[in-house]
Amino acid sequence: MQIPADMVINVMITAMGAHINKPVSMTIYHVGSSMSNPLKISTFKNCVIEYFAKHPLKIQQGNPIRTSKTITLLSSMSIFNRYMVIRYVIPLKVFKYVNIVLGRAFNAWYLDAERKINIIFRLASLYKPYVLINTM
């Protein structure tokens, strides 16, 4: 079961406000969501796509970052790693050798792409417990 983060954060803020300038108490707050109206992953996915279509992120020059209308959902870290290797790591390795043959003419681009892929792997590892509950 997923509990939306904004629900938990809203309760935390409300609890802090309710207890400000009051003596310490042992009040316990419980936050949960109901099975009568569950948040389906497909609904969440569609909300994310719709949000970024309406509010695109912008690069430093102010141009919007183009986003895909589809999101690939992966169910485990092994599938994520396989996807990343096939989709990004192998093509980047091929480009590395092409770059060497071309006298490292595209070295800055290669190093930037390699850095970004490493960041993605680190973020995936960091957020794994929050998004892949069954793979801990």
Image: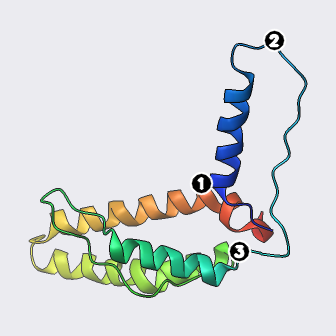
Instruction: Give the camera-side residue of 48 and 70.
Output: 48
Task: Give the residue pinned by disc 3.
Answer: 39
Q: Earlier in the sequence, mark 2 or mark 3?
A: 2
- The x and y percentages for residue 92 are 33, 78
Distance CA(mark 1)–CA(mark 2): 37 Å
Q: Nearer the viewer, mark 1 or mark 3?
A: 3
Task: Give the residue pinned by disc 2.
Answer: 23
Residue drawn at (13%, 70%) of the image? 104
Distance CA(mark 1)–CA(mark 3): 23 Å
The quarter of the image holding the N terminus is: bottom right
- The x and y percentages for residue 90 are 40, 83
- The x and y percentages for residue 103 are 9, 73
The quarter of the image holding the C terminus is: bottom right
- 88 relative to 118, above or below: below
Instruction: Give the camera-side residue of 98 and 112.
Output: 112
Q: Which structural element holds mark 3?
A: loop
Task: Give the residue pinned by disc 1.
Answer: 126
Q: Earlier in the sequence, mark 1 or mark 3?
A: 3
Residue drawn at (42%, 72%) of the image? 51
Three-letter code for the amino acid on which mark 1 is drawn: Leu
